[in-house]
Structures are given as C-alpha cells and as structure tokens.
Image (cartoon, rainbow, N blue to C red):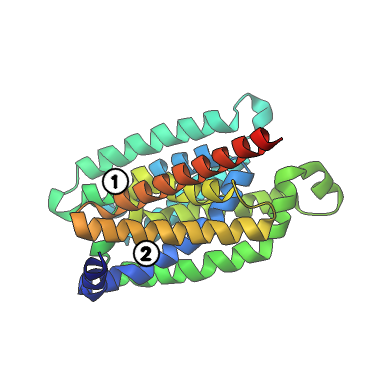
Amino acid sequence: MDDLILEFLASPVMREALPPALLIAIVTASMSVMVMAHRLSFLTVGVSHASLAGLGLAVTLSLPLLPTATVFAVLIALLLALIPRKKGISEDAGTGILFAGSMALGVLLISTANSAEVDLFGLLFGNILTISPVDLKWLYFMSGLIPVLFFLAARAWWSIAFDAVTADASGLPVSSLRLLLYGLVGLTVILCVKLAGIVLTAGLMILPAACAWFWGRSLFSLWLLSVLFSLLGTITGLIWSYIYEWPSGATVVLALCALFVISWSLNWGKSWATVYKG
C-alpha cells in the first residue's frame, strides 16, 4: 500500500489534479455546513442539474464553459430565493420546475452540438484529471472568493438558520443574507463540476457536513470537522481512483459516503453504549 501511495504522489497527472481537488474539498466542505443548517440539500441538486443549461449555452455559443455556467447557476439560485412563497409556489416546487426545465434545455442544446466539442461524461460525472489551464485559473479565483464571503457571513447565516425572526429583530438583513447564501451555493456548485460532475455534485455539498453533524456542536467545530472529512474523502477517493482506474468524481463521492456510514455507525454504537450503561 505504501508503494501505491508513493506511486500515486509521483504521478504527474495526480500531482496536477491534487491541489485543485483539495481546494474544491475545502470550499465545498465550508458551504456544506450552511447547506445542512438551512436545509438546502434539494437546492444543491436542483442548481447542479439546472447548470447543464448554462453548459449547453456555453457549448452552443462557443463561450467560456465554467464562467457561463457560473452565471447561469447563480441566476437560477437567486431566482429560487426570490420565488414568492405566498403565491402558491413552494421552494421545493420551484426548484423542481427550474431543475426540470433547465435540464431539458441543456440536454437539447448539448445534443445539437458537435460530439467532439463536448465531454458529456465529464460534465455529468466529473473528471478532475483533465482540467485545463483556463479552468484551473477560474477554479483558483472561485476558491479564493467563496471562502472570503463565507467567513464574512457565516455567523449571521448560522443565526438565521436557527432563529430567523430573532435575527431579523436584531437588525440582520435576513433577505440580503439569504440571497448571498443562495448565490454562493450556485457558485460552489459550478466549482464542483470538474471534480464530481453535475450528477454527483450534491454529494460534495452535503456529505462533509453530514459526517461532521454527528460529532460537532458549534459552528467552528462543524466547519473544522467538515473540512477534515472532505479532505480525507477527496484524498482517499483520488487514491482509489488511481489504483483501480475508477472515475475520479464518483470515487471521491463514494469515499465520502463510506465516511458517513462509519460516522453514523460509530455514533449509533456510542448512543447504544450510553443507553446500556445507563
């Protein structure tokens, strides 16, 4: 096993893929805490699938792939935040409508493009090993922007998640902060596309915090544990991907699922041991 890990680290392809993958892991782990706290899991699924329309527009109009998809994903996320709930459209219904419509538009646009221009498997399931220099610059820029905004707004988001009425009464701009959160979820979703693809992005946005939720209590402890779980899952997944020649995105998500099962099992065993002693 040690030889395989050394071989993994010596691989030029893996050495190039590891830094952006770890950056994505840190950013998504941070945002996953707020996704869990605000119960936005379905939003991440909807925005990630809706982003296929943005990718389709980029391919059809020969526009930069990730920047175009980013603008589209953020617009979709903000539109979901602005849906008037009192008009009979709930947030989950609105997400489903935009998810289906945007996904259908993306499929039609991509189906009309030259197959040589589109790596459909990479878009759907991710492939961090084929990241281009242009994509790398975009990822580095986004990986710097999202954490700055996250740390500036984290405590306010945390307060809103558990008591929005009190947060509003204390003077926090709840509506603006909610828009910012949804917009950052849209940005983070596109950040994940190269690693996990459209289909598996929700795993990166949910699983790290889901693992941490068994052990952390405060905002800081949840964030720290979420980052550690995300980094461990990403590194483990990439190593498995290298050893067994599996798709990198799917393997990373599978590793995070394994960590979730382990966390749940240990926490369940701890709870039963406490009950038994009592």
Please identify the quarter of the rendering in which residue 128 is found: bottom left
- C-alpha gap between disc 1 and disc 2: 17 Å
Q: Viewed as shown, does residue 125 lie left or right of 185?
A: left
Q: In front of the other: label 1 or label 2? A: 2
Q: Is residue 4 above or below residue 126?
A: below
Q: Is residue 124 visible?
A: yes
Please identify the quarter of the rendering in which residue 6 is found: bottom left
Dot 1: within a 10 Å radius of its alpha carbon, few (fewer than 14), some, or many (20 or more) residues? many
Please identify the quarter of the rendering in which residue 12 is found: bottom left
| Residue 235 position within the rendered picture, expressed as x and y whole percent measured from the top left | 36, 62
The residue most toward the top is: 88
Which element type, helix, strand or loop, lies under badge 2?
Answer: helix
Q: Which residue is mark 1?
A: 124
Q: Sequence-wise, which precedes: disc 1 or disc 2? A: 2
The residue positioned 35% from the left and 53% from the top of the image is 252
Q: Is residue 63 visible?
A: no
For the residues bearing labels 1 and 2, Cβ distance under 8 angstroms? no
The residue positioned 45% from the left and 71% from the top of the image is 141
Q: Is residue 7 above or below residue 34?
A: below
| Residue 177 position within the rendered picture, expressed as x and y whole percent measured from the top left | 68, 53
Q: Which residue is mark 2?
A: 21
Mark 2: amino acid: Ala
Mark 1: amino acid: Leu
Which dot marks residue 211?
none
Q: Viewed as shown, does residue 194 lie left or right of 24?
A: left
| Residue 157 position within the rendered picture, expressed as x and y whole percent measured from the top left | 69, 53
Quarter that holds the C terminus: top right
Dot 2: within a 10 Å radius of its alpha carbon, few (fewer than 14), some, or many (20 or more) residues? many
